[in-house]
């Protein structure tokens, strides 16, 4: 299966960027690709938080269940998703970069069923759509960070 790595930068401090990336309550309002988030656990967002996320992927509605397995604000969090016979692990790192934050994403896929292993060679077809969706999320969160910076008290 395709592994994906991406890097970007947002002109906001790591604390703000981390908060935006992990604010599941506001994700449907901030991320164009997310239709709905249903929290499956109570309490604050952190290690062990589970949610069901519905988004549009390749013009189709797709619902997946994710869980935060590592949570170290404001520097990193990891989310895991078991989808169609494969386990996806997405690690987000947030590093200070001047007045902004560098975002590094590592997404790894481990096929666990025979069907998923047989489909592995075709994963490059899906990887492009996934990269595009991730970049759109980052761009949407960049906009949210910029808007928050403009409305912050001086």
Image (cartoon, rainbow, N blue to C red):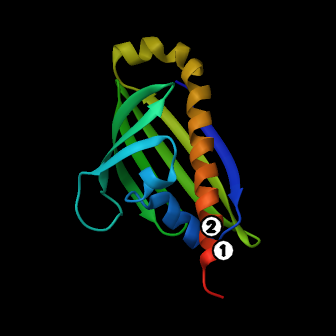
Q: Residue at x 53, y 64 (%)?
A: 18
Question: Which numbered circle lies on residue 101?
Answer: none
How packed is label 1: few (under 14 Cα within 10 Å), some, or many (20 or more)?
A: few
Report x, y in % for residue 142. Answer: 64, 58
Image quarter where the C terminus lies is: bottom right
Report x, y in % for residue 107. Answer: 53, 40
Q: State whether residue 95 is above or below residue 118.
A: below
Q: Residue at x 77, y 71 (%)?
A: 98
Q: What residue is pinned by disc 2?
A: 147
Report x, y in % for residue 11. Answer: 71, 65
Q: What residue is pinned by disc 1?
A: 150
Q: State whether residue 91 is above or below residue 130.
A: below
Q: Nearer the viewer, residue 62 or 65?
A: 62
Q: State whether residue 56 is above or below residue 47.
A: above
Q: Nearer the viewer, residue 151 or 92?
A: 151
Q: Is residue 80 left or right of residue 144?
A: left
Q: Secondary structure at mark 1?
A: helix
C-beta proximity under 8 Å, tags 2 and 1 = yes
Q: Secondary structure at mark 2?
A: helix
Q: Is residue 84 left or right of residue 152?
A: left
Label 2, label 1: how many angstroms apart (C-alpha)? 5 Å
């Amino acid at each position: 299966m395709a592994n994906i790595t991406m890097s970007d930068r947002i002109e906001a401090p790591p604390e703000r960027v981390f908060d935006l990336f992990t604010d599941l309550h506001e994700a449907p309002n901030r991320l164009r690709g997310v239709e709905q988030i249903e929290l499956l656990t109570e309490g604050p967002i952190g290690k062990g938080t589970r949610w069901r996320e519905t988004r549009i992927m390749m013009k189709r509605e797709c619902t997946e269940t994710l869980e935060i397995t590592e949570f170290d604000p404001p520097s990193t969090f990891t989310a895991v998703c078991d989808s169609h016979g494969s386990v996806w692990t997405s690690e987000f790192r947030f590093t200070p970069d001047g007045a902004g934050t560098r975002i590094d994403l590592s997404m790894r896929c481990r096929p666990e069923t025979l069907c998923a292993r047989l489909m592995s060679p075709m994963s490059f077809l899906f990887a492009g759509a996934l990269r595009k969706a991730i970049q759109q999320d980052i761009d949407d969160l960049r906009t949210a960070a910029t808007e928050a910076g403009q409305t912050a008290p001086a």
